[in-house]
Amino acid sequence: MSQAVIAYVGLGANLGDPAATVRAAAQRLATLDDSDLLGLSRLYRTPAWGVEAQPDFINAVAGLRTSLAPLDLLARLLDIEREYGRDRTREQRWGPRTLDLDLLLYGDCVLDVAGLQLPHPRLHERAFALVPLLDLDAEVLIPGQGRARDAVSVLEQSNIQPL
């Protein structure tokens, strides 16, 4: 692969069998063209964020080495979500979902275009994404924010439980 970068994808689900869905979606990521799955964090049970009156989520982060451009990678992630029954047009923001795939980081890329902001604009505020991210890379930097471990150090983490 030429011009490959390391990208991190947040995985989350809270409908059906969310742990099985997250594991299966990670395996689906391993089949993406021009990409290699480098690893999957532990799975974590986390309370819902935003809309709290819903089942807990299962969250994880996958690391990919990819030569897909950021928007192409995002398009593949949205395709995978649809394969698992997600219809973003019909769901409540921050509501329950069969599968959520968020492109968190794409190397050191900073990007703000229609449909995609990199790094993920709220990554530094979300322990449910930072904790599993740190499983994969304890030294990872969030462009414009600094070290992920510094960001998570000021966030509540006691409600994030490894499975």
Image (cartoon, rainbow, N blue to C red):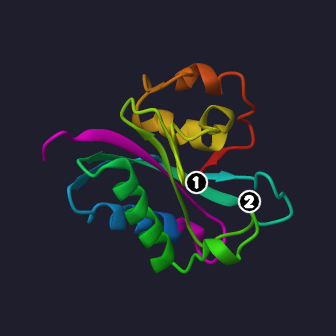
Q: Of label 1 and label 2, which has the lower sequence position?
A: 1
Is 2 contained in the magenta span?
yes
Q: Amino acid at mark 1?
A: Asn
Q: Amino acid at mark 2?
A: Trp
Q: Residue at x 35, y 68 (%)?
A: 28
Give the magenta range.
1-19
Q: Residue at x 20, y 56 (%)?
A: 34
Q: Residue furthest left?
A: 1
Left or right: 18 as drawn, with respect to 46? left
Left or right: 25 as drawn, with respect to 125? left
Q: Which residue is mark 2?
A: 94
Mark 2 element type: loop
Nearest to viewer (mark 1 / mark 2): 2
Q: How many marks?
A: 2
Q: Which residue is mark 1?
A: 59
Is 9 contained in the magenta span?
yes
Picture layout, residue 119 above or below residue 96: above
Dot label at residue 160? none
Q: Residue at x 58, y 43 (%)?
A: 129
How busy is the neighbourhood of tag 1: few (under 14 within 10 Å), some, or many (20 plus)?
many
Q: Residue at x 24, y 54 (%)?
A: 35
How busy is the neighbourhood of tag 2: few (under 14 within 10 Å), some, or many (20 plus)?
few
Quadrant of the image occupied by residue 59: bottom right
Left or right: 133 as drawn, with respect to 53? left
Residue 141, horizontal then vertical, whole percent = 46, 24
Q: CA distance from mark 1 to mark 2?
A: 14 Å
Residue 43 visible in the snapshot: no
Mark 1 element type: strand
Quadrant of the image occupied by residue 77: bottom left
Residue 87, horizontal then vertical, whole percent = 60, 77
Residue 70 visible in the snapshot: yes
Residue 159, horizontal then vertical, whole percent = 74, 43
